[in-house]
Amino acid sequence: PFDVKHDGDPFSDQDGETRSKYHTRIAEIIAEIFTRQHRILVYSVCVFHRHGYLMFWDRSGTVVTEPLVLTDIDGAAKLFRFLCIIGRMNNVQLGYDHTIQQVGNSNPDVVKMKAHRPLSEYHTIIDSPWPLYRVLVHTDGALDQRFIIGRHHSASQSVHGRGTQGFVAYDPMQDRMCFLKQAWRADRASGNPEYSTYKLLHEAEVKHVATPICGGDGAVSPTRTFAQKFFTTAQSPIGRILHRFVVEEVFRSLCDICSELCPAVTAHEDAWEKAGILYRDVSEANILIYEHTENNERKLKGVLTDWDMCKTKARLRIQTEQANRMGTWKFLSAKVLNLPEHTLRPPRPDDLESFIYVLLWMGCRYHTHDHSDEGNIFQAFLYEFF
Protein backbone atom coordinates (compact mmCIF):
# COMPACT_ATOMS: atom_id res chain seq x y z
CA PRO A 1 0.00 0.00 0.00
CA PHE A 2 1.17 3.47 -0.96
CA ASP A 3 -0.74 6.34 0.73
CA VAL A 4 -0.30 9.94 -0.47
CA LYS A 5 -1.62 13.09 1.21
CA HIS A 6 -1.08 16.65 -0.04
CA ASP A 7 -0.71 18.35 3.32
CA GLY A 8 -0.02 17.77 6.98
CA ASP A 9 2.12 15.10 8.61
CA PRO A 10 0.33 13.01 11.27
CA PHE A 11 3.67 11.48 12.32
CA SER A 12 5.09 14.79 13.51
CA ASP A 13 3.33 18.15 13.31
CA GLN A 14 -0.40 17.42 13.75
CA ASP A 15 -2.43 17.57 16.92
CA GLY A 16 -2.98 14.36 18.86
CA GLU A 17 -6.51 13.73 17.60
CA THR A 18 -5.54 14.07 13.90
CA ARG A 19 -2.51 11.87 14.44
CA SER A 20 -4.58 9.22 16.20
CA LYS A 21 -7.23 9.21 13.44
CA TYR A 22 -4.62 8.64 10.73
CA HIS A 23 -2.83 5.93 12.70
CA THR A 24 -6.17 4.16 13.18
CA ARG A 25 -7.01 4.48 9.48
CA ILE A 26 -3.72 3.10 8.17
CA ALA A 27 -3.82 0.29 10.77
CA GLU A 28 -7.29 -0.68 9.53
CA ILE A 29 -5.98 -0.88 5.96
CA ILE A 30 -3.10 -3.15 6.98
CA ALA A 31 -5.46 -5.26 9.10
CA GLU A 32 -7.62 -5.87 6.02
CA ILE A 33 -4.54 -7.02 4.11
CA PHE A 34 -3.60 -9.43 6.90
CA THR A 35 -7.19 -10.72 6.97
CA ARG A 36 -7.65 -11.20 3.23
CA GLN A 37 -4.14 -12.29 2.26
CA HIS A 38 -2.01 -14.94 3.93
CA ARG A 39 0.75 -12.60 5.06
CA ILE A 40 3.55 -12.81 7.61
CA LEU A 41 4.45 -9.14 7.21
CA VAL A 42 3.59 -6.07 5.12
CA TYR A 43 5.65 -3.12 3.86
CA SER A 44 3.95 0.21 3.16
CA VAL A 45 4.80 3.79 2.16
CA CYS A 46 3.13 6.98 3.37
CA VAL A 47 3.78 10.38 1.77
CA PHE A 48 2.62 13.69 3.29
CA HIS A 49 3.39 16.69 1.11
CA ARG A 50 7.21 16.48 0.96
CA HIS A 51 7.78 13.94 3.75
CA GLY A 52 7.86 10.20 3.08
CA TYR A 53 7.83 7.32 5.57
CA LEU A 54 8.67 3.66 5.01
CA MET A 55 6.75 1.28 7.28
CA PHE A 56 7.13 -2.35 8.31
CA TRP A 57 4.21 -4.23 9.87
CA ASP A 58 3.91 -7.61 11.53
CA ARG A 59 1.85 -9.04 14.39
CA SER A 60 4.20 -7.73 17.10
CA GLY A 61 4.32 -4.08 16.07
CA THR A 62 4.99 -1.40 13.46
CA VAL A 63 8.35 0.15 12.58
CA VAL A 64 8.37 3.62 10.96
CA THR A 65 11.44 5.36 9.54
CA GLU A 66 12.47 8.92 10.27
CA PRO A 67 10.89 11.27 7.68
CA LEU A 68 12.49 11.20 4.23
CA VAL A 69 12.52 14.76 2.80
CA LEU A 70 11.53 13.98 -0.78
CA THR A 71 12.54 17.41 -2.10
CA ASP A 72 16.13 16.58 -1.13
CA ILE A 73 18.24 14.31 -3.32
CA ASP A 74 19.14 12.04 -0.39
CA GLY A 75 15.51 11.53 0.71
CA ALA A 76 14.26 10.92 -2.84
CA ALA A 77 17.11 8.47 -3.50
CA LYS A 78 16.24 6.43 -0.40
CA LEU A 79 12.59 6.13 -1.46
CA PHE A 80 13.65 5.21 -5.01
CA ARG A 81 16.07 2.57 -3.72
CA PHE A 82 13.38 1.14 -1.43
CA LEU A 83 10.92 0.81 -4.34
CA CYS A 84 13.60 -0.81 -6.53
CA ILE A 85 14.26 -3.41 -3.82
CA ILE A 86 10.52 -4.05 -3.37
CA GLY A 87 10.20 -4.53 -7.13
CA ARG A 88 12.83 -7.29 -7.09
CA MET A 89 11.43 -9.19 -4.09
CA ASN A 90 9.75 -12.56 -4.44
CA ASN A 91 6.49 -13.37 -2.64
CA VAL A 92 8.19 -14.81 0.44
CA GLN A 93 10.37 -11.70 0.83
CA LEU A 94 7.25 -9.54 0.44
CA GLY A 95 5.74 -11.35 3.41
CA TYR A 96 3.50 -14.00 1.89
CA ASP A 97 3.28 -17.27 3.84
CA HIS A 98 5.18 -19.89 1.80
CA THR A 99 3.23 -22.74 3.45
CA ILE A 100 -0.01 -21.51 1.85
CA GLN A 101 -0.46 -21.70 -1.92
CA GLN A 102 -3.46 -20.74 -4.04
CA VAL A 103 -5.02 -23.64 -5.96
CA GLY A 104 -7.48 -23.73 -8.85
CA ASN A 105 -10.59 -25.78 -9.56
CA SER A 106 -8.56 -28.35 -11.48
CA ASN A 107 -6.39 -29.21 -8.49
CA PRO A 108 -7.01 -32.91 -7.58
CA ASP A 109 -7.67 -32.04 -3.92
CA VAL A 110 -10.23 -29.39 -4.93
CA VAL A 111 -11.96 -31.81 -7.32
CA LYS A 112 -12.16 -34.37 -4.52
CA MET A 113 -13.48 -31.75 -2.09
CA LYS A 114 -16.28 -30.67 -4.45
CA ALA A 115 -17.41 -34.30 -4.71
CA HIS A 116 -17.58 -34.56 -0.92
CA ARG A 117 -21.07 -34.25 0.61
CA PRO A 118 -20.94 -31.98 3.69
CA LEU A 119 -23.07 -32.81 6.73
CA SER A 120 -24.54 -29.29 6.89
CA GLU A 121 -24.07 -25.73 5.64
CA TYR A 122 -21.45 -25.25 8.37
CA HIS A 123 -19.29 -27.93 6.75
CA THR A 124 -18.71 -26.20 3.41
CA ILE A 125 -15.92 -23.86 2.31
CA ILE A 126 -16.80 -23.18 -1.34
CA ASP A 127 -17.44 -19.43 -1.58
CA SER A 128 -17.05 -18.32 -5.21
CA PRO A 129 -15.63 -14.78 -4.72
CA TRP A 130 -12.86 -16.15 -2.51
CA PRO A 131 -9.93 -18.21 -3.84
CA LEU A 132 -9.03 -21.63 -2.45
CA TYR A 133 -5.68 -22.40 -0.85
CA ARG A 134 -3.63 -25.45 0.05
CA VAL A 135 -2.21 -25.18 3.57
CA LEU A 136 0.61 -27.26 5.01
CA VAL A 137 0.33 -28.07 8.73
CA HIS A 138 3.46 -29.22 10.54
CA THR A 139 3.50 -31.64 13.47
CA ASP A 140 6.74 -32.52 15.25
CA GLY A 141 7.78 -36.08 14.51
CA ALA A 142 5.33 -36.51 11.63
CA LEU A 143 4.98 -35.65 7.96
CA ASP A 144 3.39 -32.31 7.07
CA GLN A 145 -0.29 -32.65 6.21
CA ARG A 146 -2.14 -30.63 3.59
CA PHE A 147 -5.62 -29.11 3.79
CA ILE A 148 -7.80 -26.98 1.51
CA ILE A 149 -9.27 -23.74 2.89
CA GLY A 150 -11.27 -20.85 1.46
CA ARG A 151 -12.72 -17.80 3.15
CA HIS A 152 -12.03 -17.48 6.85
CA HIS A 153 -14.82 -18.57 9.19
CA SER A 154 -13.66 -16.05 11.80
CA ALA A 155 -10.80 -13.53 11.96
CA SER A 156 -9.33 -10.98 14.33
CA GLN A 157 -9.82 -7.38 13.18
CA SER A 158 -6.66 -6.14 14.93
CA VAL A 159 -3.40 -5.62 13.04
CA HIS A 160 -1.29 -6.51 16.09
CA GLY A 161 -1.55 -9.34 18.59
CA ARG A 162 -2.60 -12.93 18.10
CA GLY A 163 -4.35 -12.30 14.78
CA THR A 164 -6.46 -15.41 15.25
CA GLN A 165 -8.10 -16.89 12.15
CA GLY A 166 -10.33 -19.93 11.82
CA PHE A 167 -11.18 -21.85 8.64
CA VAL A 168 -13.45 -24.71 7.74
CA ALA A 169 -10.97 -27.03 6.01
CA TYR A 170 -11.02 -30.11 3.81
CA ASP A 171 -8.70 -33.03 4.55
CA PRO A 172 -8.06 -34.78 1.19
CA MET A 173 -6.25 -37.72 2.78
CA GLN A 174 -9.25 -38.69 4.95
CA ASP A 175 -11.97 -37.16 2.71
CA ARG A 176 -13.52 -35.19 5.58
CA MET A 177 -14.26 -31.65 6.65
CA CYS A 178 -12.47 -30.33 9.72
CA PHE A 179 -11.47 -27.02 11.31
CA LEU A 180 -8.12 -25.22 11.00
CA LYS A 181 -7.03 -22.46 13.36
CA GLN A 182 -3.94 -20.30 13.28
CA ALA A 183 -2.77 -17.59 15.67
CA TRP A 184 0.42 -15.76 16.61
CA ARG A 185 1.17 -17.03 20.10
CA ALA A 186 3.57 -15.29 22.50
CA ASP A 187 7.18 -16.34 21.95
CA ARG A 188 7.96 -17.48 25.49
CA ALA A 189 9.61 -20.60 26.84
CA SER A 190 6.78 -20.82 29.37
CA GLY A 191 4.10 -20.62 26.68
CA ASN A 192 1.82 -23.58 26.18
CA PRO A 193 0.93 -23.97 22.47
CA GLU A 194 -2.79 -24.58 21.97
CA TYR A 195 -2.31 -27.80 20.00
CA SER A 196 -0.25 -29.22 22.90
CA THR A 197 -3.05 -28.24 25.29
CA TYR A 198 -5.64 -30.06 23.17
CA LYS A 199 -3.44 -33.17 23.22
CA LEU A 200 -3.21 -32.99 27.03
CA LEU A 201 -6.98 -32.54 27.35
CA HIS A 202 -7.64 -35.41 24.95
CA GLU A 203 -5.22 -37.73 26.74
CA ALA A 204 -6.87 -36.86 30.07
CA GLU A 205 -10.28 -37.73 28.55
CA VAL A 206 -11.69 -34.27 29.16
CA LYS A 207 -15.24 -34.12 27.81
CA HIS A 208 -16.72 -31.50 25.46
CA VAL A 209 -13.48 -30.26 23.88
CA ALA A 210 -12.28 -30.51 20.27
CA THR A 211 -10.36 -33.56 19.01
CA PRO A 212 -6.86 -32.64 17.72
CA ILE A 213 -5.63 -33.98 14.36
CA CYS A 214 -2.28 -32.28 13.84
CA GLY A 215 -0.50 -29.00 14.52
CA GLY A 216 2.51 -27.08 15.72
CA ASP A 217 4.66 -23.99 15.29
CA GLY A 218 5.97 -24.82 11.84
CA ALA A 219 8.88 -26.68 10.35
CA VAL A 220 12.52 -26.71 11.57
CA SER A 221 12.51 -22.90 11.77
CA PRO A 222 9.19 -21.55 13.16
CA THR A 223 7.79 -18.35 11.65
CA ARG A 224 8.52 -15.49 14.06
CA THR A 225 7.75 -11.77 14.15
CA PHE A 226 10.57 -9.28 13.72
CA ALA A 227 9.27 -5.80 14.63
CA GLN A 228 9.76 -6.27 18.39
CA LYS A 229 13.55 -6.21 17.87
CA PHE A 230 13.37 -2.49 17.06
CA PHE A 231 11.79 -1.58 20.40
CA THR A 232 14.14 -0.73 23.27
CA THR A 233 11.77 0.49 26.01
CA ALA A 234 10.46 -1.51 28.94
CA GLN A 235 7.03 -1.53 27.27
CA SER A 236 8.31 -3.14 24.07
CA PRO A 237 5.94 -5.71 22.54
CA ILE A 238 6.57 -9.42 22.87
CA GLY A 239 7.70 -11.50 19.93
CA ARG A 240 5.23 -13.94 18.44
CA ILE A 241 5.30 -17.33 16.70
CA LEU A 242 2.80 -18.52 14.10
CA HIS A 243 0.93 -21.54 15.53
CA ARG A 244 -1.38 -23.62 13.33
CA PHE A 245 -3.42 -26.73 14.11
CA VAL A 246 -6.44 -28.74 12.96
CA VAL A 247 -9.28 -30.38 14.92
CA GLU A 248 -11.90 -32.88 13.77
CA GLU A 249 -15.05 -30.93 14.65
CA VAL A 250 -16.56 -28.09 12.63
CA PHE A 251 -18.44 -25.69 14.89
CA ARG A 252 -21.21 -23.12 14.69
CA SER A 253 -21.89 -20.21 17.06
CA LEU A 254 -23.80 -20.68 20.31
CA CYS A 255 -26.53 -18.13 19.35
CA ASP A 256 -29.77 -18.91 21.18
CA ILE A 257 -28.95 -22.43 22.38
CA CYS A 258 -28.23 -21.51 26.00
CA SER A 259 -28.75 -25.11 27.14
CA GLU A 260 -25.43 -26.01 25.51
CA LEU A 261 -23.64 -23.81 28.05
CA CYS A 262 -23.73 -26.73 30.50
CA PRO A 263 -21.31 -28.97 28.53
CA ALA A 264 -18.85 -26.06 28.41
CA VAL A 265 -18.96 -25.81 32.21
CA THR A 266 -18.36 -29.56 32.38
CA ALA A 267 -15.35 -29.19 30.08
CA HIS A 268 -14.01 -26.44 32.35
CA GLU A 269 -14.42 -28.67 35.42
CA ASP A 270 -12.91 -31.73 33.69
CA ALA A 271 -9.89 -29.75 32.51
CA TRP A 272 -9.18 -28.60 36.07
CA GLU A 273 -9.84 -31.92 37.80
CA LYS A 274 -8.36 -34.33 35.23
CA ALA A 275 -5.63 -32.31 33.48
CA GLY A 276 -4.82 -29.55 35.98
CA ILE A 277 -5.59 -26.81 33.45
CA LEU A 278 -7.46 -23.55 34.14
CA TYR A 279 -9.21 -22.09 31.08
CA ARG A 280 -9.06 -18.30 31.84
CA ASP A 281 -10.97 -16.91 28.82
CA VAL A 282 -14.68 -17.70 29.20
CA SER A 283 -16.75 -15.82 26.63
CA GLU A 284 -19.72 -16.30 24.32
CA ALA A 285 -17.40 -16.57 21.29
CA ASN A 286 -15.44 -19.47 22.83
CA ILE A 287 -18.45 -21.70 23.54
CA LEU A 288 -19.50 -23.27 20.26
CA ILE A 289 -21.93 -25.90 18.97
CA TYR A 290 -20.84 -29.13 17.32
CA GLU A 291 -23.61 -30.32 15.01
CA HIS A 292 -23.37 -33.96 13.91
CA THR A 293 -25.47 -37.03 13.15
CA GLU A 294 -25.70 -40.07 15.38
CA ASN A 295 -27.80 -43.09 14.31
CA ASN A 296 -29.28 -40.91 11.54
CA GLU A 297 -30.38 -38.38 14.15
CA ARG A 298 -29.20 -34.75 14.27
CA LYS A 299 -27.31 -33.98 17.47
CA LEU A 300 -26.04 -30.75 19.02
CA LYS A 301 -23.24 -30.57 21.58
CA GLY A 302 -21.71 -27.58 23.35
CA VAL A 303 -17.91 -27.43 23.20
CA LEU A 304 -15.40 -25.19 25.00
CA THR A 305 -12.82 -23.97 22.45
CA ASP A 306 -9.85 -21.58 22.22
CA TRP A 307 -7.47 -22.82 24.93
CA ASP A 308 -4.58 -20.52 24.00
CA MET A 309 -4.83 -18.49 27.22
CA CYS A 310 -5.10 -21.38 29.67
CA LYS A 311 -2.53 -22.15 32.37
CA THR A 312 -1.57 -25.31 34.22
CA LYS A 313 -1.72 -25.49 37.99
CA ALA A 314 2.08 -25.39 38.05
CA ARG A 315 2.17 -22.16 36.03
CA LEU A 316 -0.50 -20.57 38.21
CA ARG A 317 1.81 -20.92 41.20
CA ILE A 318 4.40 -18.79 39.46
CA GLN A 319 3.87 -15.06 38.94
CA THR A 320 2.96 -14.54 35.30
CA GLU A 321 5.18 -12.58 32.94
CA GLN A 322 2.11 -10.79 31.54
CA ALA A 323 0.51 -8.97 34.45
CA ASN A 324 -2.46 -7.52 32.56
CA ARG A 325 -5.20 -10.13 32.35
CA MET A 326 -6.25 -10.88 28.81
CA GLY A 327 -9.81 -11.89 28.04
CA THR A 328 -13.18 -10.54 26.97
CA TRP A 329 -14.01 -7.39 28.93
CA LYS A 330 -17.75 -7.87 29.35
CA PHE A 331 -17.35 -11.37 30.84
CA LEU A 332 -14.43 -10.77 33.23
CA SER A 333 -15.13 -11.19 36.95
CA ALA A 334 -15.66 -8.18 39.18
CA LYS A 335 -12.47 -8.90 41.10
CA VAL A 336 -10.34 -9.06 37.95
CA LEU A 337 -11.78 -5.76 36.71
CA ASN A 338 -11.40 -3.92 40.02
CA LEU A 339 -8.14 -5.34 41.40
CA PRO A 340 -5.32 -5.28 38.80
CA GLU A 341 -2.97 -7.18 41.10
CA HIS A 342 -5.49 -10.02 41.22
CA THR A 343 -4.72 -10.75 37.56
CA LEU A 344 -1.33 -12.17 38.48
CA ARG A 345 -2.83 -15.36 39.90
CA PRO A 346 -6.41 -15.75 38.66
CA PRO A 347 -8.27 -18.38 40.70
CA ARG A 348 -10.90 -20.73 39.37
CA PRO A 349 -13.96 -18.82 40.74
CA ASP A 350 -13.30 -15.97 38.30
CA ASP A 351 -13.90 -18.29 35.35
CA LEU A 352 -17.08 -19.64 36.95
CA GLU A 353 -18.36 -16.10 37.47
CA SER A 354 -17.73 -15.44 33.77
CA PHE A 355 -20.06 -18.32 32.84
CA ILE A 356 -22.86 -16.51 34.72
CA TYR A 357 -22.29 -13.37 32.63
CA VAL A 358 -22.26 -15.39 29.39
CA LEU A 359 -25.61 -16.95 30.35
CA LEU A 360 -27.06 -13.51 31.17
CA TRP A 361 -25.70 -12.05 27.92
CA MET A 362 -27.13 -14.85 25.78
CA GLY A 363 -30.47 -14.75 27.59
CA CYS A 364 -30.80 -11.00 27.12
CA ARG A 365 -29.90 -11.15 23.43
CA TYR A 366 -31.80 -14.22 22.24
CA HIS A 367 -34.72 -14.85 24.60
CA THR A 368 -37.89 -13.01 25.57
CA HIS A 369 -37.72 -11.14 28.89
CA ASP A 370 -39.32 -8.23 30.79
CA HIS A 371 -37.58 -5.56 28.70
CA SER A 372 -37.74 -7.20 25.27
CA ASP A 373 -40.09 -4.52 23.96
CA GLU A 374 -38.34 -1.60 25.68
CA GLY A 375 -35.44 -0.91 23.35
CA ASN A 376 -33.93 2.09 25.13
CA ILE A 377 -34.10 0.55 28.61
CA PHE A 378 -32.69 -2.73 27.34
CA GLN A 379 -29.87 -1.04 25.45
CA ALA A 380 -28.97 1.08 28.48
CA PHE A 381 -28.86 -2.04 30.68
CA LEU A 382 -26.57 -3.94 28.30
CA TYR A 383 -24.24 -0.96 27.98
CA GLU A 384 -24.03 -0.17 31.69
CA PHE A 385 -23.82 -3.76 32.96
CA PHE A 386 -21.41 -5.22 30.42
Image (tube, rainbow, N blue to C red):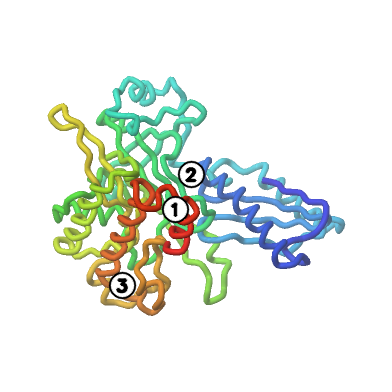
The type of residue carrying mark 3 is Pro
Residue that badge 1 annotates: 223
Decide: is 159 above or below 103. Answer: below
- C-alpha gap between disc 2 and disc 3: 36 Å
Q: Residue at x 65, y 58 (%)?
A: 23
Which quarter of the picture shows residue 27? Answer: bottom right
- C-alpha gap between disc 3 and disc 1: 31 Å
Cβ atoms under marks 2 and 1 closer than 8 Å: yes
Q: Residues within 10 Å of mark 2 (few under 14, many from 20)?
A: some
Decide: is 385 above or below 184. Answer: below
Q: Position of residue 141 (x, y in %)?
A: 26, 48
Residue that badge 3 annotates: 346
| Residue 309 visible | yes
Q: Residue at x 25, y 69 (%)?
A: 348
Choose mark 3 or mark 1, whichever is in front.
3
The type of residue carrying mark 1 is Thr
- C-alpha gap between disc 2 and disc 1: 9 Å
| Residue 218 visible | no
Q: Position of residue 117 (x, y in %)?
A: 29, 23
Q: Position of residue 261 (x, y in %)?
A: 25, 51
In the rendered structure, the answer to whether residue 267 lies left or right of residue 221 reads left
